[in-house]
Amino acid sequence: MDDHRDYDATSHDEAPVREKVVQRRRRPPLSCSECRRRKLKCDRSLPCGQCIRSKTAESCTFVGSQPGDLLKTSRRISPSNAHHQRPHGQVDQQTGAGSMFVFDSRLNAKSTPDRVSKNSQKEDLHELRQRLRSLERAMAKSVPAIQTPETTAHDTLSETTTSQTGPGAMYLEDRIRFLPDSNFRGKKGKTRYFGRSNWCTTASFFQDIGTFMRQKHNNESYRDYHSMKKYKHEIWTRESQEHQRAFRERAFEIEEMVPSRAIADQLVQLYLDSFETTYRVLHVPSFLKQYADYWANPQKPDIAFVAQLLAIMAAGTRFLPTSSSSGQPNAYQHSASKWIMAIQSYISCTSISPHINFKMVQTQTLLLLAQLANATDSELAWISSGALVRSAMTLGLHRDPGRFRKATAPFWSELRRRLWTTIVELDLKIALDRGMTPSIDLDECDCNLPSDIDDADIVEDMKHEPSPTNSTRRTQNIYQCLLSKSLDLRWRVVKKVNALRFSLSYDEALQINEELSRFLKTGSDCLNDHVLSSDASSSVRHQFAQSLHQFTIQKFVLALHRPFSLSVARLPKCSYSRKICLETSLEILSQMQLPAPGEIIVHPHIKQLASGMFCDDVFHAAITVCVELSLQAQEMGQSSGSRIDNINPSVLLSMVQSQQSVMLQAIERTLDDFGRTILCGSGRGSKPFFFFSMILASAKSRIKGEDPMTELDAVSKRAVQIGRGIISGLSYEEALACAMRPPTQDGFPQSPDPPIAPFGTTPISASLLDFDFPSLLSTDFGGDLATLDLNGWFDGVESGGSDAWNGAMFADLPQL
């Protein structure tokens, strides 16, 4: 303090000189007095780490400047940076423009006028007492050091509120900022982690489902579930053993797994009309030439080409025409799982250094697309994506092709840019689904974006880059080019949303949203303005790629706004995010809605991926709408006794009910779509249907003001009955009608025993352990997790494997 008084005295003596020359002002000290005296770096904790190590914690003080200097200095400190210059434990309150306060532990009640603020003296005293209590609690700890938010977020959560991230107080919900326990599952050596953008974070808001499950554990009325569990286990054991035995006998004979020419032609064309429009992997003319050469002499095939062909056909099976209500897979979905396993074996046997070339990376990319399309090993997609990224970086695909002097031909440079862009797109998609940060750091990549040119315009022996195409003509690569323009922005969204320490300010989120919206509008306008070709196949590709472009950007908009939307109870300022999440979720559900029962999807459509590649996205969007319904029910209950000026309560209630009716219709259709995608005989796809039935029942109960437990009990029994019927060979409509019949004395509807599906007709997933209904309701959520048998239910909507789950998913969370 003496130093500042001397400085002020000198300033008054030199007043005449100051009128002519503006001298530099001394900035307010930020380090504690001991660190300034000893010239050490201070971490600005209270007490700081240096004082703790030197055992002088009692003398650790932060000295503020005089009021006059503070008032002049505060205008040079931006509000966004002010909170970084305050010690830990201090509640950051901005009471007016230009106010700043540096905490001094030696201040007392009489020194409050030294604070430059517009608060009253009473508020200043109250804040000072709160700071002193925080210091006393810290000193009473067994561990004397107070960690900063950057070192331990867990201690910060228990001791202080979340730090500010901008001019306004950005207090996110704790379960969003620090993640709920449901994102940390398992025990001992078998654990799973899911990040912030995963659907588990949103599902954790439905606490009553966990309560219901705990109450029903060991309930004798659920004894029929155990018999169904044994029944399904026998089916899967028999089929899986036959499947594994057949695969082991011809594990490496992939050239014999290619179907007839007619089927291959159809599957290849379906792939080219769908995935290849946006996820560019192939040079189509070169591939078609190799394809024709293969059929000209199939006795001596190129095994590397056959592996690519099987991966392409496996991805194309998802788009084979099929009825939306049959519940039966198309004839080649069973074969697709075998093809995928064969390609995996081929890659594992050839993935040694000399064989890692451009063609091998193409095969790995096609394999990942096939896995995503068929919902096979979706939980392991993150691992597969990481292996693909490292293979690509081994070839240097992330670097500028011009740096490879012997590989600078325009043909190879363009193919490298296209393939690298596709790999980044797939990595972002999987990272967003899993709640992980991207495996790729685009700041360390200098590979340019692909060019908007047709495949026919680039050939392997060309010497110069082709000339730009006419802007009014639509090229084969326009879809990837348009989507790649927002690649860097979407990468920032995944990185910031899933970061360990959430630091995304709301202002920055709104800025990113504005840019994403601009890319979405520009891309849509560009695709609509291009002259449509008279070729029917070209029109089909255009419709699919346009829908994929819109869906891709919308899911990143949802991921950007969802953390703020789920924190709207604490952040009324974020009501805009709540509106964006609701509107975008409804758009996604409408876009992915299956056609009417009995209608056949003839051409490739993005909705055919709703039960495969984009199942998690549809499921998450549906949960988001349920959260909105729950929030509205809570708000209506809180405002039932209040009155809004100039608004008739009955009119307001009618408006809310009308909106809720639209939302309920959308998510009820989605529930039916989940049920119609369950495969007859196997029950594959049951997980999203069962779990969403529970969430929807909880949301409906809150709207009606009823006890959710009663509704959850009835819905869970009905969902199990539907699943049992579909496993036995009924269609979804037949199983639903059976489940809606009046129950018998044992609590289940009357129904004839449906015949078991003949062995050999049931499609087999590469995942041998799928969800079974009774295990969900017979789990002890409060006891030993060793008995947990959820078969990966909560580890992915279409999980490819069995993983332990933390039973406290809905525990210790506030009710909506």
Image (cartoon, grey):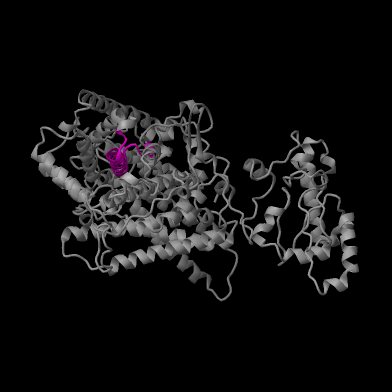
Residue 545: image quadrant is bottom left
Which residue is more in the foreground, 71 or 137?
71
Pinpoint residue 36: horizontal percent, then vertical percent: 80, 47
Pinpoint residue 582: horizontal percent, then vertical percent: 44, 59
Residue 746 left/right relative to 128: left
Which residue is more in the foreground, 410 or 153?
410
Decide whether residue 84 is among the magenta residues.
no
Pinpoint residue 795: horizontal percent, then vertical percent: 42, 38
Residue 521 left/right relative to 784: left
| Above or below, comparing residue 65 to residue 369 in the picture | below
Question: The N terminus is located in which quarter?
Answer: bottom right
The answer, for residue 694, to whether it is visible in the render is no
Q: Main secondary structure of the magenta part?
A: helix
Residue 585: image quadrant is bottom left
| Above or below, comparing residue 630 to residue 143 in the picture | below
Pinpoint residue 162: horizontal percent, then vertical percent: 64, 50
The magenta stretch spans which residues?
355-381
The answer, for residue 53, to whether it is visible in the render is yes
Q: How many marks?
A: 0
Residue visible at 59% across and 53% down in the picture: 172
Question: Looking at the image, which residue sits at the far left?
Answer: 296
Question: Looking at the image, which residue sits at the far bottom?
Answer: 646
Residue 577 left/right relative to 540: right
Residue 456 left/right relative to 720: left
Which residue is more in the foreground, 331 or 206?
331
Which residue is more in the foreground, 262 or 625?
262
